[in-house]
Image (cartoon, grey):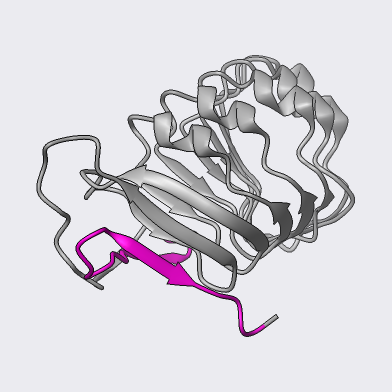
């Protein structure tokens, strides 16, 4: 059992807490527990899963904050914790996940600013933070036309950095389905010359 690499239990109406013993399964690369009724907090022992690449915890009832132990998952490329009751701030150390492609944090109770360190993630293609309590300014290079960034219902200003001699992104609102279990992502860009898009929270 300790050599198990892939566990998919999504959509089974499982409830209770996520067992801390999962942290003993060091060979896990895929841990998919989304669309259940798990409650309590994300076990800190998940930070011991050093081989983990895909972590799906969306659509549960998980609360608490993201443990600092969680930041040991250096190989993580897909993280979905959307639609829970998570709170606190997003650790700036998320900027070290150089292979991260999908970071889905929407529909929680996160506060504070979106770490500017996220702009240093070269592989990031989807960043979803909608329906939280974020505020402040988040900056990404204007040449990141490949980045789907949704931040509705936050007091956030998106400011595109123009430090690279590249054309402005094409304006589009075409939806892009991340996966069958992830929220639909809308690509949103400003039509103004300075690539500035301001959206203030009017619904919370």
Position of the N terminus, as image quadrant, is: top right
SS majority, magenta? loop
Q: Which residues are magenta?
A: 179-203
Residue lying farthest bottom? 203
Residue placed most toward the observer, 171 or 34? 171
Q: Is residue 187 above or below residue 25?
A: below
Quadrant of res 31: top right
Q: Is residue 191 magenta?
A: yes
Residue at the front extreme of this rendering: 194
What residue is shown at x 56% (from left), y 24% (from top)?
5
Using residue 35 as the reference point, say whether residue 62 is left or right of it: right
Left or right of 131: which side holds 174?
A: left
| Residue 119 x/y as whole percent | 42, 36
Q: How many numbered marks does the figure carry?
A: 0
Q: Position of residue 147 (x, y in %)?
A: 31, 49
Residue 178 coordinates in the image, percent (x, y): 38, 56
Mark yes or no: residue 67 visible. Answer: yes
- What residue sits 77% from the left and 23% below the top? 69
Placement of 174 over or under 69, stated as above or below: below
Q: Relative to 74, does residue 6 appear above or below in the rendering? A: below
Residue 47: give x, y in percent of width and height: 73, 23
Task: Please report the residue visible at 58 percent of the width from the left and 31 percent of the height from the top.
Answer: 94
């Amino acid at each position: 059992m300790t050599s198990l690499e892939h566990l998919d239990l999504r959509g089974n109406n499982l409830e209770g807490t996520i067992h801390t013993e999962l942290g003993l399964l060091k060979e896990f690369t895929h841990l998919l527990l989304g669309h259940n009724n798990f409650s309590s907090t994300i076990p800190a022992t998940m930070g011991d899963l050093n081989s983990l690449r895909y972590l799906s915890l969306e659509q549960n009832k998980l609360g608490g904050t993201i443990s600092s132990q969680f930041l040991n998952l250096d190989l993580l490329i897909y993280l979905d914790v959307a639609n829970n009751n998570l709170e606190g701030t997003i650790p700036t150390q998320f900027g070290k996940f150089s292979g991260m492609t999908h970071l889905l944090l929407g529909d929680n109770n996160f506060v504070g600013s979106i770490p500017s360190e996220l702009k240093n993630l070269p592989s990031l293609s989807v960043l979803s933070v909608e329906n939280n309590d974020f505020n402040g300014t988040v900056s990404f290079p204007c040449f990141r036309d490949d980045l789907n960034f949704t931040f509705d219902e936050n007091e956030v200003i998106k400011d595109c950095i123009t430090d690279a001699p590249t054309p402005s992104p094409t304006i589009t609102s075409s939806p892009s389905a991340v996966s069958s279990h992830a929220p639909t992502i809308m690509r949103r860009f400003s039509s103004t010359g300075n690539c500035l898009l301001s959206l203030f929270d009017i619904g919370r």
